[in-house]
Amino acid sequence: MTPGEIRALIEGVRAGAVAADEAERTLLGALRQQPFEDLGFAKVDHHRAIRQGFPEVILGLGKTPAQIAEIAVRIAGREAPLLVTRASREAFDAVQARLADVEYHELARAIVLRRPLPRASGTIVVASAGTSDLPVAEEAAITADLMGNDVTRVYDVGVAGIHRVLAQRATLEAARVIVVVAGMEGALPSVVAGMVNVPVIAVPTSVGYGASFGGIAALLGMLNSCANGVAVVNIDNGFGAGCMASLINHA
Amino acid sequence: MTPGEIRALIEGVRAGAVAADEAERTLLGALRQQPFEDLGFAKVDHHRAIRQGFPEVILGLGKTPAQIAEIAVRIAGREAPLLVTRASREAFDAVQARLADVEYHELARAIVLRRPLPRASGTIVVASAGTSDLPVAEEAAITADLMGNDVTRVYDVGVAGIHRVLAQRATLEAARVIVVVAGMEGALPSVVAGMVNVPVIAVPTSVGYGASFGGIAALLGMLNSCANGVAVVNIDNGFGAGCMASLINHA
Amino acid sequence: MTPGEIRALIEGVRAGAVAADEAERTLLGALRQQPFEDLGFAKVDHHRAIRQGFPEVILGLGKTPAQIAEIAVRIAGREAPLLVTRASREAFDAVQARLADVEYHELARAIVLRRPLPRASGTIVVASAGTSDLPVAEEAAITADLMGNDVTRVYDVGVAGIHRVLAQRATLEAARVIVVVAGMEGALPSVVAGMVNVPVIAVPTSVGYGASFGGIAALLGMLNSCANGVAVVNIDNGFGAGCMASLINHA
Amino acid sequence: MTPGEIRALIEGVRAGAVAADEAERTLLGALRQQPFEDLGFAKVDHHRAIRQGFPEVILGLGKTPAQIAEIAVRIAGREAPLLVTRASREAFDAVQARLADVEYHELARAIVLRRPLPRASGTIVVASAGTSDLPVAEEAAITADLMGNDVTRVYDVGVAGIHRVLAQRATLEAARVIVVVAGMEGALPSVVAGMVNVPVIAVPTSVGYGASFGGIAALLGMLNSCANGVAVVNIDNGFGAGCMASLINHA
Amino acid sequence: MTPGEIRALIEGVRAGAVAADEAERTLLGALRQQPFEDLGFAKVDHHRAIRQGFPEVILGLGKTPAQIAEIAVRIAGREAPLLVTRASREAFDAVQARLADVEYHELARAIVLRRPLPRASGTIVVASAGTSDLPVAEEAAITADLMGNDVTRVYDVGVAGIHRVLAQRATLEAARVIVVVAGMEGALPSVVAGMVNVPVIAVPTSVGYGASFGGIAALLGMLNSCANGVAVVNIDNGFGAGCMASLINHA
Amino acid sequence: MTPGEIRALIEGVRAGAVAADEAERTLLGALRQQPFEDLGFAKVDHHRAIRQGFPEVILGLGKTPAQIAEIAVRIAGREAPLLVTRASREAFDAVQARLADVEYHELARAIVLRRPLPRASGTIVVASAGTSDLPVAEEAAITADLMGNDVTRVYDVGVAGIHRVLAQRATLEAARVIVVVAGMEGALPSVVAGMVNVPVIAVPTSVGYGASFGGIAALLGMLNSCANGVAVVNIDNGFGAGCMASLINHA
Amino acid sequence: MTPGEIRALIEGVRAGAVAADEAERTLLGALRQQPFEDLGFAKVDHHRAIRQGFPEVILGLGKTPAQIAEIAVRIAGREAPLLVTRASREAFDAVQARLADVEYHELARAIVLRRPLPRASGTIVVASAGTSDLPVAEEAAITADLMGNDVTRVYDVGVAGIHRVLAQRATLEAARVIVVVAGMEGALPSVVAGMVNVPVIAVPTSVGYGASFGGIAALLGMLNSCANGVAVVNIDNGFGAGCMASLINHA
Amino acid sequence: MTPGEIRALIEGVRAGAVAADEAERTLLGALRQQPFEDLGFAKVDHHRAIRQGFPEVILGLGKTPAQIAEIAVRIAGREAPLLVTRASREAFDAVQARLADVEYHELARAIVLRRPLPRASGTIVVASAGTSDLPVAEEAAITADLMGNDVTRVYDVGVAGIHRVLAQRATLEAARVIVVVAGMEGALPSVVAGMVNVPVIAVPTSVGYGASFGGIAALLGMLNSCANGVAVVNIDNGFGAGCMASLINHA
């Protein structure tokens, strides 16, 4: 049972639409289900939807297409939305063979199965510094969208042409939370956080070469931001940023 | 002028309590003030209070007591609250000589001058893993408090005795945002984020020795958290975490 | 001669089942054998079975299938069990062409030839944090099994859903030694070591991306564990952990 | 209550020496005690003695003498042995003012209060490579001794004069577990583990200069040991090694 | 002889003001002087003034006050200007005892002896991000000034309040070369270089804490600048930046 | 409009060749154009040609051939020169299909479309240490050439045969700025900067193996140069060095 | 001319076998040759054979087969021996097409053309720790052999079975210089240097995984060797070690 | 007994100056002495003088003055020369109180007791790049001198003024082995090794700041030297270089 279903049930009882006995049976049935389902190679954490309002998300990296499909079927079987990140096309094919309605977002390398969720009232802006940062930015945007948020994309506004980001001031100020994605020197979050009064989730990317060291330069830049209101997630972790932004927007 | 003062003025005009002419004069006067005040060695950013709802915060590290006192006087002169982080007792003495009402928080190494600010409705929990993490945790707590938030402290609940943090489940679930401070392996944010459904701001500390490398171990642990809803600030950056939490709580 | 054979011989003498002359001849013959066999490109350390109770284990990494097969034949020729780690299928084919009874464990990338060995009385638990950690966990489990230990597998119990590992308390407490395998932030060993009173061998894995830096994050996390009774082996070194656990269990 | 006390009580009941009522009262009283004691700045984990057979050990680093003394008094008050590591003489003075019987081991920087504990039957050897490694080696030896183990010290047997360690073969072979402490290139654990058939706990030290990088060279050397049966603890973590060795010896 | 003196001599010959014989004698005398003067512990490179238009600059770090004074006297004895960087007050006292006219710049830790040099026509702007960056910025400014350049200082214009640097557009565009000094995330050079069409010399500083790693974060940020026309010098190397800017301005 | 076109228009007005009305219309039209062109995945910064005298340069790395071609067409459509760095042959084919006149420099991996630009009077020398450094050196040389500079190449003059670089003294002294490209220990910039009195732009390359760490050794060597007048760009960043040298030469 | 040819000529003059005029002509002719030959992409350093007794050695890494062949032909054309390291089979084919007598050492990845050189009287021992270290060890052995040294190979004598290297004491003591090749923890040079009284050249290899970090662990171990008489070359640099050993042996 | 004494005895027997009986007694007596002397905290390796021709050298770092004095007395008691490196003045005072003849070299931080040793015929040149490198260079020179070598010092010849080292060509060519000491970019060994045909021992120093990272920049530069015949010792390890040079010179 999702928190929404639980709430609906309780409201139903209060409103007299659901009998107390029936509510009790439904709730007991839900509690009797194991908090995780053991597939041998994985313990699918169904309890997470209760604790956290969204089911377990599958990190595709390091799992076989068959493993991904097996876990995906269990999650989707509980009427929960499905998100697989870092998913290859092979993984998508394996999942689609068993869950016909899934979509594949090639740029973001994400497999998605949409299910209705309560939507938050605020807007999440996802901003990115360069064209090469798009896969990570899209992963963040798709995650936030799937978790029930309105998302505005502001792409290719890196600091080397500062007028591009200054031109977006109105859009940025209208956000409740901003995800800023940047590689190379990773300076965009500092500039954005200095312009607005909302939390900024900074995502360093591995875009760059040489002394970017696979995203370390951007990561360190963001951790040392001289602006207030910046927190950082792992290199290339668009999912984590989208998820964090959604939690803030739903708070 | 703070956003609150601007809002009050506009409300006053709408309510007929303030004449249009007077409101215009007041607003023009505020706009005529330079957005920053040039002290030669520093440009005090008075505009920040308008952009971000809180004036510039002084990082004491690397500044002389005289420099800190000079900047502090300018900020306090605008009726804004004052916060100096990483402040030595010498810096406090220099500030107190010119601003009698300031307080010094020894454990957090913070100089504070309180001014009334709108308070947010949610609660911020500041949790820490060990006793040695207290200075950083206190910096976060004092920052959040000063910025207008209710703060609950949950200290010394490291993962080596997992029952200690499990015993705090109710307190954690009641928070709108949680700051988790930990050194050594920095595992506490993962555990906390797995227990609740609110954003977690993780603060690695330099507590530890050997392969903790001044906080790198904890920093990397937090960036790689397998739990959803964790974002990270710089090592020992209690202020940054408190500020980020306040932004989320006020969103 | 293995320690077991030596012990059997001495017991035989004491019991009168083996003549003193025969025993002397057997022992002298064994001592006359060179402590290592020189293949030109390798010196096979047959003495290790005497010193350490288990023959040399072949690290497949960086050796050609032909080299692996040649060394394997020499080891198996002394009636010793055989273990090749990090072995490709090509290496397995080359070994199987000369030693028909060998098995290949694909997930663990291990070639195994079983021979009877004295079994220890305690149980080794191998726990892992995520599905992607399985190859390393299986390498540990197969090593421990081959070296004469009972092994219990507890997989996919990462700290982001802390109830999964708490549910295994009884299994963990029943172990004489626990191997804990985890990538990303590597927090599981701290939690497990805090729950039980037995030695924990922690194995960081290279599972993760970005700031996991190929397992450095997990390695540092484990080295800095705030829990007592944790020691660490190299990244992805399932073999080393299984071997260490076996030594502890046989102590 | 320690596990020993619980066992004694149960034996007493079985033997008729303790009345069932009295046993019940005693056990209930123990269970009613909180699993940790909250000092505000610390939560003393009294439950650890039950879970792990030894009470919480205080890491002196980063705590004030007053904090250390306060925690020490609570631990000693439960009749448990006391160990404070990385303790300055100032910390010792503060503890001794409240607990007269404590000893200070200057070389190991350890504060110790002895209490009778069940002793294990095997011997722990603590070996060190050079004279400068002694503080760490002594911390390991004192920890193991306090936790109820017989300890043999084998000091200054570094690999540059290999005959020194070869001369200790008999002592090494007689151990149930060996702690090997070394700085600089950290090669001693590999040599020792190749000589014997018991688990080796390797402790890198920060002894060295230049490219030893505060113990990183030794740490990496030990993690990459080509010998079987080596596991590693943090740089300079003599306590951790002694504790791990004790767990193995008591297994 | 400095290049200026050589040019003057040649001009004098062409104009008939200097006899050919006298010019020859002067030039031969200069050439007969050794290209370096051997003090035993140092070889003072007098030839550098000919090759590079400015005499050897003394890096005070790691030299005793007596060594610095001895080298300073030799350089000043050739009528050349003198610059000692990273000089303590003790070093200044030792130099002043032998060269009365030297000045000490406390903030920049520089000892200076001024001598007339040809001045370049363009302007060098030295910009800095924060108040704590001033010592490095001043070292750059003093170096450039001493080498014959007009210098404009633009301090405390970090990117967190982007309006501060935007307000300096006219000053920046008027420069022939800009030195940008910044610690923490080091983002200012990217923004400045994107605003103007002149070369930018970026100087990372060790200002910051935690993951600034003594200036590594700023250094990497600057090396990865997405803006064109940025080159970088060593962390805290104000002298190197001032010298490079002077070479560009004199080109 | 490029700065050259603007200048030409103004000259035309002054000379009477262009009517004031027409000039006004032309200028207004240019200003009405957006400072950047939004392609969705990219915002092409046409304003850069005005700010910086050269249009946006496309970093091929991490962009698809289709994206590169699309951006290239927009840039070339404004009569600006085109430069794509780190371009694969596939990218070249995609661009050539739409812009027939482009050239491909295989060694430098650069796509180039030449357009007349004002040429600077000085010469840029591009020197390299070894044959393997040529791709980076050529990227620098082609960039500088395209931006309107005369370029002299001095290749394979590494310091291990110091007579090779000494033999180039005259060429080096004749330059207005020198780009020095070197991998391995990266010592060439120090030697060159000690020989001449012009700015040196040092480019570390990833040429080398083992402890060259992908160019880190060369990068650190150059940042720590004991010679005056050296500034450094990112590893393998030939473009950045050529661009910086051009800015200096045009100053 | 090689030093040998020069010496022969002078001896011929002294012995009356060569006329003074002829000797002068020969020497002048040699001096008139350029010290390096310019191929455009490379400056072949023919002078090196005079300075260093051995011609330039070609590092195959990062050069095309055509470039390698072109340089090889120039070197061989001066009757000098030829050595190409890190050479692929494709490079060998390209060289062999133009120089029929070259050999290819597959394991060492070396192309060799032998020419008679004066041989040193001492012996060089090349020792290696494991089978996977052979390519590097062979590169060292072939280099030393080609440069005129007697080489003894002692392979697979790693420290985990210390009896293997102890068994080689006589061979090691008979050497004038020893090259020791080892990956993983790189402990073998310390043990060997402690056994003998001759210089040891240590070569770390990239053999290992995880925290070997591509040879860093072995490199650091060797740099921190507690034994006297150890110096280190780059990771996997068998050539450098062979060359250094040859210089010592010929001293 | 030193190797010299053994040789003398054998020569005496051959010459009839020593009776066979007496020689036997002397040799047996020497063999009966333990190969090391156990002081509890140290095992003084007297056997090293036999194996390596020079007694154990004491690294003062991390030892107390009392420990140093105790070990020094034992070494000196065997008529061997004494060398203590990294020795403070306090350590010297403690040693001098018990061994009146010792000298203290303040610059090199070395305690020395001279004893006659066979001297090698070749010369060792110790070259250094800058004045701040002198302490390390002197440690190398004093070590080599004490071990029986003629030493020539060539100081302050860094590559930024390349004419200084070129002026020393004759001195460098006359050496049998050269020690080159340099900090910052560490380029001097490459230049020197390219000029001569003798082995070069490179010593990186921690001289520098910022991105020199305590000598890492110089260390990496030297390990990646493009010149042949360079091997490297630890950062600041003047002793190791002097010792290695002595071994080469005595070979």
Image (cartoon, coloured by chain):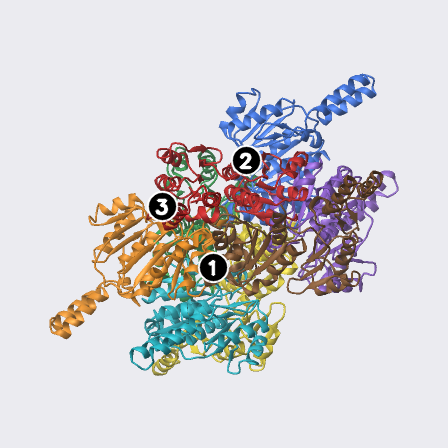
Chain colours: A yellow, B green, C cyan, D orange, E blue, F purple, G brown, H red
- Camera-side mark, 3 or 1: 1
CA gap, disc 3 and disc 1: 58 Å
Residue at 54 percent across and 24 percent down: it is E95
Residue at 49 percent across and 36 percent down: it is H108
Instruction: Check the image and name the residue furthest to the right.
Output: F17
For residue B107, which numbered disc appears in the image? 3
Q: Position of residue B23 (x, y in %)?
A: 52, 43
The relative height of residue E173 versus residue E120 in the rendered view (above or below) is below
Instruction: Check the image and name the residue furthest to the front.
Output: H16
Q: Position of residue H159 (x, y in %)?
A: 64, 38
- Whether residue B124 can be seen here: no
Look at label 1 and name its amino acid: Leu
Dot 2 corresponds to which residue? Answer: H132
Dot 1 corresponds to which residue? Answer: G166
Confirm or deny contact between disc 3 and disc 2 (CB under 8 A): no
The relative height of residue E27 versus residue A81 in the rendered view (above or below) is above
- Camera-side mark, 3 or 2: 2
- Whether residue F53 can be seen here: yes
- Quadrant for the C terminus of chain F in the image: top right
Circle 1 crowding by C-alpha within 10 Å: few under 14, some 14–19, many from 20: some
- Camera-side mark, 1 or 2: 1
Q: Position of residue D182 (x, y in %)?
A: 41, 53
Look at label 3 and name its amino acid: Leu
CA gap, disc 3 and disc 2: 41 Å
User: What chain is tagged by disc 1?
Assistant: G
Q: Is residue C64 left or right of residue H19?
A: right
CA gap, disc 1 and disc 2: 43 Å
Q: Viewer-proximal residue, E124 or H249?
A: H249
Q: Secondary structure at mark 3?
A: loop
- Labels 3 and 2 within one chain: no
